[in-house]
Image (spheres, rainbow, N blue to C red):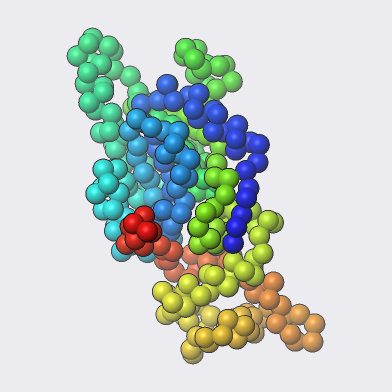
């Protein structure tokens, strides 16, 4: 699946990020714990050079916990600090502040040694659409968003989000990259809801999701749709799920659009259990190719 989707507001977001970097101590990169590699924007690496980065795996409650731990270790081996959180439930919020402070400790120690008064850590939060940035910000800020337009280089319209006295967040719009070079990246993002459904063929996305589940999480697929076995033929699998869940069209025929929407809706809501779409081993192999 090749998707080219680079609206003007995303190009603007890239410019805004570049302009604000000089104000930032650390970057908080929010990714989806279900697809930690596919939900990273490679453009971010180009933009955020020479800045300490904290990788935050959000929606950890929807991801396979065993694989999430592998991803955190994978990032650590690459010299990147990573933590997992559930922003929706407010779990892991304190870790974000602690980890951000840890990443800038050396810089702040040098500032204090020069007689500069300690201040809050300034963090830029970035991530692709629908990764949970707004939810995270509302949780950590407790919706107490303050304007601080008197700082040099910040216009009066710029909002910084104060997290107590230790952290200040600068939000950015979610940005996707212009084109997904790897077809599987597009499918993974589509399956988890990072791309607007209106520009997708949902049946194609559901076919990808069902084939993945059948191969990697067959028990969860069977239990959710009360299947005694998983048909190898994808049409038969659609038929079995559609029949079980009443996704019918005229004459009792299976409505494949409704079936696709049902599967994706339940997958995204975590109703098929905790699922991760990619592993560090697969990512390492892809990099080596």
Q: Residue furthest bottom?
A: 228
Relative to 277, is 208 on the left or the right?
right
The quarter holding residue 279 reads bottom left
**In the image, residue 35 above or below residue 204:** above
Say if residue 220 shows up in the picture.
no
The quarter holding residue 263 reads bottom right
- Where residue 12 sits: x, y (%)? 60, 32
Instruction: Name the one closer to the observer, 226 or 54.
Output: 54
Q: Residue furthest top?
A: 115
**In the image, residue 282 above or below residue 144:** below
Q: Residue at x 57, y 33 (%)?
A: 13
Relative to 42, is 283 on the left or the right?
left
Q: Residue at x 31, y 46 (%)?
A: 82
Instruction: Name the one closer to the observer, 92 or 102.
Output: 102
Instruction: Name the one closer to the observer, 145 or 233.
Output: 233
- Where residue 24 sits: x, y (%)? 40, 25
Q: Residue at x 48, y 72 (%)?
A: 212
What is the quadrant of the N terminus in the image? bottom right
- Where residue 38 sits: x, y (%)? 46, 54
**In the image, residue 135 above or below residue 27:** below
């Amino acid at each position: 699946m090749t998707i080219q989707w680079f609206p003007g507001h995303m190009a603007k977001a890239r410019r805004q990020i570049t302009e604000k970097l000089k104000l930032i101590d650390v970057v908080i990169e929010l990714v989806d714990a279900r697809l930690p590699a596919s939900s990273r924007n490679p453009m971010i690496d180009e933009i955020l050079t020479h800045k300490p980065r904290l990788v935050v795996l959000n929606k950890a409650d929807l991801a396979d916990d065993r694989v999430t731990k592998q991803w955190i270790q994978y990032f650590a081996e690459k010299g990147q600090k990573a933590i997992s959180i559930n922003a929706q439930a407010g779990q892991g919020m304190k870790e974000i502040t602690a980890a951000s402070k840890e990443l800038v400790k050396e810089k702040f120690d040098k500032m204090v040694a020069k007689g500069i008064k300690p201040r809050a850590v300034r963090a830029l939060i970035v991530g692709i659409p629908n990764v949970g940035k707004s939810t995270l910000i509302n949780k950590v800020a407790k919706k107490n968003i303050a304007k601080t337009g008197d700082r040099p280089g910040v216009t009066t319209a710029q909002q910084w989000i104060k997290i107590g006295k230790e952290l200040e967040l600068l939000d950015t719009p979610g940005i996707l990259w212009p084109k997904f070079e790897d077809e599987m990246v597009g499918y993974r993002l589509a399956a988890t809801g990072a791309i607007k459904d209106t520009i997708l063929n949902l049946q194609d996305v559901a076919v990808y999701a069902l084939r993945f589940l059948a191969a990697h999480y067959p028990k969860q697929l069977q239990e959710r749709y009360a299947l005694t076995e998983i048909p190898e033929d994808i049409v038969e699998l659609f038929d079995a799920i559609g029949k079980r869940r009443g996704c019918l069209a005229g004459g009792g025929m299976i409505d494949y659009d409704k079936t696709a929407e049902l599967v994706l809706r339940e997958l995204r809501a975590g109703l098929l259990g905790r699922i991760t779409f990619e592993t560090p081993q697969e990512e390492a192999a892809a990099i080596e190719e």
